[in-house]
Amino acid sequence: MAEERPTSKRRQEEVVLQQQYRRALSSFEGIILSQIEIKNKLGDRLNYSILTGIIILGGVSISMVVLLLTLSAQINRISGVVVEMNTHFSSVSSQMHQIRGYIGAMEKRVALLEEIDDMTGVMDLEMTRIAGDMDAMRQNLQGIDAHVAAVRNNVGNISVNMDLMNREVQDMSVDMQQVSKPARTMNKMFPFP
């Protein structure tokens, strides 16, 4: 009987040890499962943060592409206007050269008039030629006026294009402010160092 008591005590101790082992194992399993659940939640938050960042960066890149395309279009317009102004300046220069030629011809004819005081018929002919030269000068001046008006128009177009570019840049600034709001909100929600 004495031998039965120690074996029953051993069995009871083994049962207690097994129960303690099972409790320890179940609590360890609970700790591991809670850590896995926390890691899954953190992983989901990180995935949402990365997805939001990608969307924001996509919006910023689209805005930058729109800005670059707008600037490129405005630069092409300005370049075309400058080329057109250049051709008008060339035309004005050639017409000024013709006017100088007409003035030189007039000076020569006026010098001839001093020598042929008594020849009024020849003088009338020369005056008719001078009147023709004056008409040609008037026509050239009208052409210069038209070219100057075209240059003014081109300068007005440049001013309008610059105003449009300024508005686009201001709109982009407002868009950037709006795009950065979600990022600031995300920084407030997830203050990671």
Image (spheres, rainbow, N blue to C red):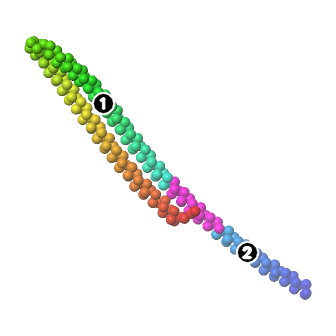
Relative to residue 119, is residue 50 depicted above or below?
Answer: below
Please name the residue that numbered disc 2 is placed on: 24
Residue 9 in percent (x, y) is at 84, 83
Image-based side of 14 in relation to 94, left or right: right
x, y percent for residue 66: 42, 46
- Looking at the picture, which amino acid does disc 2 mark? Ala
Is residue 44 in sight in this rendering?
no
Q: Is residue 128 magenta?
A: no
Q: Amino acid at mark 1?
A: Phe
- The image quadrant that residue 132 belongs to is top left
- Which dot marks residue 89? 1
> Tag 1, which secondary structure?
helix
Above-or-below relation of 6 to 186: below
Please name the predominant secondary structure of the magenta segment in the image: helix
The N terminus is located in which quarter? bottom right
Give neighbour class at mark 1: few <14, some 14-19, many 20+ (Cα, 10 Å): some
Image: 134 above or below 17: above
Instruction: State which tag comes first along the sequence, 2 or 1.
Output: 2
Q: Nearer the viewer, mark 2 or mark 1?
A: 1
> Which quarter of the figure is the C terminus placed in?
bottom right
Measuring 59% from the left and 61% from the top, which residue is drawn there? 43
Q: Nearer the viewer, residue 92 or 17?
A: 92
- Quarter location, residue 10: bottom right
- Look at the image and say whether residue 39 sits in the magenta stretch: yes
In percent of width and height, residue 191 lies at 54, 65
Q: Residue furthest right?
A: 2
> Which element type, helix, strand or loop, lies under badge 2?
helix
Magenta region, residue range:
35-54
